[in-house]
Image: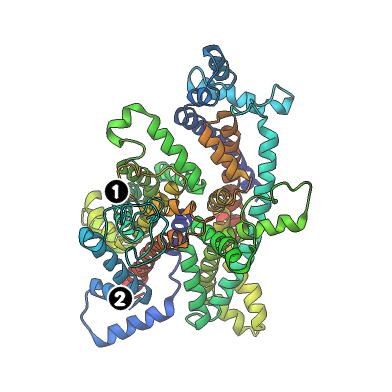
Amino acid sequence: MLRFVLRRLIWAIPTLLIVTFLVYVAIRLGTNPAEAYERANPRANEAKVQEYKELNNLTGSYVEGYIGWLTDFLSPLWGGEGWQRSIVGSREVWPEMKDAMANSLRLGLTASFIGITVGLSMGIFAALRPGGLRDTAVNTSAFVAFSVPPYVSAMIFQLVFAVLWSKWFGSSLLPTSGVYPPGQQGFDLGLMLKHMILPVTVVAIQIIAVYARYMRASLLEVLNSDYMRTARAKGISERRVLVNHAVRNSMIPVVTVAAIDIGAILGGLIITERIFQYPGMGDFFLTAFDNGDFPQLMPFMVIIVTAVIMFNLLADVSYAWLDPRIRLG
Amino acid sequence: MSQHELVESTIEYERTHDGVDDVLLDDEAVGLTTASMSPRQMAVRRYFRHKGAFMATILMAIMIIFVILTPITTRYGVNEAIFPAEPGKPNSYLSPRSEAWFGTDTIGRDIYSRLIYGLRVSLIIGISSAIFATIVGVTVGSIAGLRGGRFDDGLMRVTDIFLAFPFLVALLVVRNFLGELAFLEPIVGERTSIRFIILLFVIFGWMGVARLVRGSVLALKEREFVEASRALGASHTRVIFKHLLPNSIGPILVAATNAVVAAIIGEATLSFFGFGPDAGSGDTSLGLLVGEARGAVLAGYWWMIVFPCSLLVLVALCINFIGDGLRDATDPKLVQGG
């Protein structure tokens, strides 16, 4: 097992390098950083633009540029000069990104936790009586929720709970944007949670829909397998059969999918954050992308790439851990 | 969105079918009453027994008829105000009424008519990108499945990483990347052209198809009838076109419907964030209409939000149901009586 994990970990490093190189090329070519810099700083002269390009390793061949960028990117590790400043307002990138990450993680983890718990329970609930009323209800609603893009549900929620609610009842039920109301100073848990309700719901709905369907399909298959009959024939209580045999085995494919699904969850987060003007990674990315802000875009992309590769790795490892046939085979 | 679907359908295909009970019962009943039915007839029959798919097909047919008969079914031109605005009688932001069943938008255009025009563009984008993505995906997927080895490994790694990427981020980066390459301009067109958008979704769409086809080819190529065909001296090409592809038609169709939904929703996502096709030409798409709705939320113009969003969801839901029905109808386990 340890060897399996180590081998995968070692493989992850070249993958990471290749993907970040591709990202570097794509961003350098795709966003045209020098032009974006001139747009953001109209008074910058030729020399200034050249300096920006050199500081950000945007000159020379792509391989040279990438290596230079990578060295600079990792330099804070050994106390080097650190990252470049953003092109708009010349702000430091890391503190802003750290706050954005904290906000996003809070939103994403809450939504994932609620989504996975509710989704799995709904899937189990549906699979125990296949074809019954509750199965149809869960399956259909999951199917519908699955076809609703996050921005649609977000707009409908904003419309109903804030705008129309205040028209009907005088004041809006839930806030629709930000982490705190404008002008709020300091930390306030209640207010923060209140602001999180709508975005979390939007993201959680997507997660619930997916997991309910996975769990249902997976559990149905396990329930039809021979070892379930064996377990029942041995005289084990139904509860134990379900918990120890059925649910546990049906979790194998679900866990794998869960880890791979991180991209979808991140994507949903980006969209949701933008609509609720929630200052997270999604908002950070879209603003940086609009500005063509190379010094902000690259670290963001590196974090996303790392997360995606790590979760892929986690998927492989958890699959091997749960299912010995994989690691031995 | 698309990632969910891709991963999900792959998984559902690689594993057994879930709603076994009721479909199997249907199947047995079919076997008893009509002794001689071709697999295709049985599949068609199973398809129409799937309630969701049946309703979705009818709804989709109605929508397509509306789109085809555009000048008759619409009430105003795509860029036409319902009446010229006069002082004291504005034409914008009107709630639903007899002149405009679904109300009017920011500059007094009829939302009902624009929905039909928008649906036309969205369907064109969805269907054509799905067709091209399916062609590419089937080619790559069957080669990967048949040849196996390094090509297969590399391909699957690449698609894994690509599919795991946040869709919007990948889409935006690739979009800019393609748009910035000057020598591609004659082929791909302007960044906001419909051709460009279709190409973008082909680039993203083929991987899901390739995965499904690969899985199906992998499973089929070890079967006895393929072996028999090979023993008789059939070439690679013949095996692919005579045996592997016809037997993979189920997964291919399902993947194609997934690709249609992915492209329609993807177009809507791009438009929502202002990166979609150009509205300046006067044409519109579902995504642009949903994007316009964004500005109407705070003012509470519910008709500008509810109707476009409902239509988008309805289209996505219908195509998803059709895909689900196709999956049930063409599931190899059921077709071969296993």
Residue B200 locus on image (x, y percent): 37, 43
Per the model, the C-alpha gap separating discs 1 and 2 is 27 Å
A234 is higher (above) or lower (below) than A167: below
Residue identifier under label 1? B132
Can residue A142 be seen? yes
Residue positioned 55% across, 51% down in the render: A275
Q: Which chain carries label 2?
A: B
The residue sitting at the front extreme is B88
Residue positioned 49% across, 33% down in the render: A22
Residue positioned 27% across, 31% down in the render: B186
Residue type at mark 1 is Phe
Q: How is colour applied across the structure in the image?
A: rainbow
Residue A137 locus on image (x, y percent): 50, 77
Quarter of the figure with the C terminus of chain B: bottom left
Q: How crowded is mark 1: few (under 14 residues within 10 Å), some or many (20 or more)?
A: many
Residue type at mark 2 is Phe
Residue A179 locus on image (x, y percent): 68, 50
Can residue A325 be seen? no
Residue B48 is labelled as: 2
